[in-house]
Amino acid sequence: MVDQLTDARINPRIPTANIWLSAFLMFVLRIGSFNGLEQELRRAKRLESFVGRRKPSADTIGRVLSGFDRAELRKMVVKTNRGAWRRKAIHSRVGESYRIAAVDAHELWASRARCCQQCSVREVTVGKKDKKRKVKEYYHRVVVAQWVGVTPPGILDVELIKPGEGEVVAAKRLLERIFLNYSRLVDVITADALYLEAPFISTVLDAGKHVVIVMKQEQRDLYQDADRLRALFEPRIIHEGAKTIRAWDIPDLSSFRTLGRAIRVVWAEEETIKRKIIGGNPTQVPERETWIWVTDLPANVVPTAKIRQWGHDRWNLENRGFNELVN
């Protein structure tokens, strides 16, 4: 697959595959920069059996990567991911029949000196006290889709957020490719509260998939109706070690009027007993959190505990995706 990659150069002296393998090696060996990688590659016969005899400089790697054919890179990622499922190299939880993908945005980098046509722009305040001033900062943000609740949690695809564009708009473009390339390998999309919009949910449902999305906006009719209805019946109590969950499952709410269909709300109040040292004495302190998820899946198909589990799985994208790749 690597040998089939191309870039924007005409009659290149260093093969495209050598460039890609060098960059891949930088991640595998956790080398912090292209310059650090170049120091390794400059050593005589160092890594030639992997990278090839013609080894690139740091400047060459950066220049060539910017001209890569992204469609070819995406095809390689899709082929690798689909092959991993086929060979049973990706492991789900025991008894799990759904495949869950999380969607979220991530900022890649920012600069106050350099920019390109695809950069977003914001104003930031710099300096101290009476010397404060505002400067323009250029940055790139992407929307990322990643499998969650599995090991390893493969990243499916990435979409750049264009200047002046919201991340949900970019996410819809991303999902169109996801549903085309991973039609049978994604069943449920989970996302944070920003994605609780009718057009985004409709995009998922029209593709025959399902959603589990966080709800935080208290002014929503859906939030207020769910809050009132849960007061009419006792919650289900779930114990998970030191954590106690009071869960309400409220089906068939029609308050999401712009969506035009009934929706289900799972409301969970979680209390975790944590041991802390206060005044020199060990003390058990309760920590409380409230989580609310919106889903189209009926309770007789997917139970309350499963919706809650999928909702929390969304954090895998932050922890096992963004944080691991950055650090």
Image (cartoon, rainbow, N blue to C red):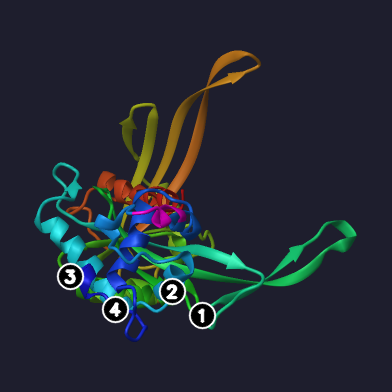
The main secondary structure of the magenta stretch is helix
**Which residue in the structure is indicated by mark 3?**
183
Q: Which mark is residue 118?
A: 1
Asked whether residue 212 is in view, the answer is no
Which element type, helix, strand or loop, lies under badge 3?
A: loop
Front-lying residue, 316 or 225: 316
Stretch in magenta: 39-44
Is label 1 in contact with label 2 (beta carbons under 8 Å)?
yes
Tell which circle, 1 or 3, labels the residue nearer the N-terminal end.
1
- Lower position in the chain sequence, tag 4 or tag 3: 4
Q: State which quarter of the image contains the N terminus.
A: bottom left
Whole-angstrom CA distance, mark 1 to mark 2, is 8 Å
User: Mark on residue 160?
Assistant: 2
How far apart are the alpha carbons under marks 1 and 3?
29 Å
The residue beneath circle 4 is 6
Image coordinates of residue 69 in percent, x first then y, are: 32, 79
Above or below, 42 relative to 116: above
Q: Judge from the rendering whether residue 160 lies leftward or rightward of residue 90; answer left or right.
A: right
